[in-house]
């Protein structure tokens, strides 16, 4: 490799810097959950219906990696992928609790506990059933 004048070098390797026309790096999606996303009516509806695939899809839409969802919910990335694709259903109470805790949502939003928010939702859906 010929030495090009005024080309900066990496100190330890002697390699040239990347050219200015190099591809830009991909913006890393956020790993923190935006609280506004969790308050969206479509998100709240999916949580109330325990539509975990829909919840995960919405999180992905708002720039959260499957890997980050998995880390928060105590699952593997492949499990999250299977849930999103509809190949796996989430019915285990323990897993639903882990998801609620990992996503930092009150258990009542998913019908896992009765609280003021759950009472309000029950009233909106038609009373005491």
Image (spheres, helix red, strand yellow):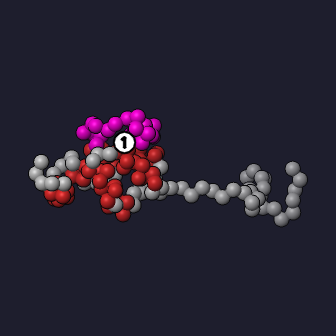
Q: Quadrant of residue 123?
A: bottom left
User: Image height check: is 115 above or below 83?
Assistant: below
- Taking the view exactly as shown, the residue that stands out farthest to the right is 2
Which of these two is toward me, 10 or 106? 106
User: Image height check: is 80 above or below 14?
Assistant: above
Q: Residue at coordinates 77% horizontally, 52% vertically from top-left? A: 15
Question: Where does the magenta region start and end?
Answer: 72-96
Tell me if I can see residue 83 in this picture. Answer: yes
Q: Residue at coordinates 87% horizontally, 56% vertically from top-left? A: 3
Q: How many marks?
A: 1
Q: Residue 59: x percent and y percent?
A: 41, 53
Q: Residue 75: x percent and y percent?
A: 39, 40
Which of these two is toward me, 98 or 4? 98
Q: Residue 106: x percent and y percent?
A: 25, 54
Residue 98 magenta-highlighted: no
Side of 56 where 1 appears, left or right:
right
Instruction: Quickly name the residue at label 1.
Output: 74
Residue 87 magenta-highlighted: yes
Q: Residue 37: x percent and y percent?
A: 37, 60
Side of 97 where 67 appears, left or right:
right
Q: Quadrant of residue 52?
A: top left
- Taking the view exactly as shown, the residue that stands out farthest to the front is 126
Q: Residue at coordinates 26% horizontally, 39% vertically from top-left? A: 94
Tell me if I can see residue 115 in this picture. Answer: no
Kindly state the secondary structure of the residue where label 1 is placed.
loop
- Taking the view exactly as shown, the residue that stands out farthest to the left is 128
User: Image height check: is 21 above or below 82?
Assistant: below
Which of these two is toward me, 4 or 55? 55
Badge 1 local density, few (<14 within 10 Å), some, or many (20+)? some
Q: Residue at coordinates 30% horizontally, 56% vertically from top-left? A: 44
Magenta stretch prevailing secondary structure: helix
């Amino acid at each position: 490799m010929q030495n090009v004048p005024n080309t900066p070098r990496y100190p330890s390797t002697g390699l040239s810097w990347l050219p200015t026309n190099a591809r830009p790096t991909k913006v890393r999606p956020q790993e923190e959950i935006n609280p506004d996303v969790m308050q969206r009516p479509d998100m709240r509806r999916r949580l109330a219906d325990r539509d975990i695939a829909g919840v995960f899809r919405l999180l992905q839409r708002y720039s959260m990696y499957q890997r980050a969802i998995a880390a928060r919910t105590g699952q593997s990335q492949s499990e999250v992928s299977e849930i999103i694709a509809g190949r796996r259903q989430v019915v285990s109470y323990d897993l639903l609790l882990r998801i609620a805790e990992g996503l930092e949502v009150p258990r009542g939003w998913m019908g896992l506990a009765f609280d003021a928010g759950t009472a309000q939702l029950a009233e909106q859906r038609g009373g005491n059933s």
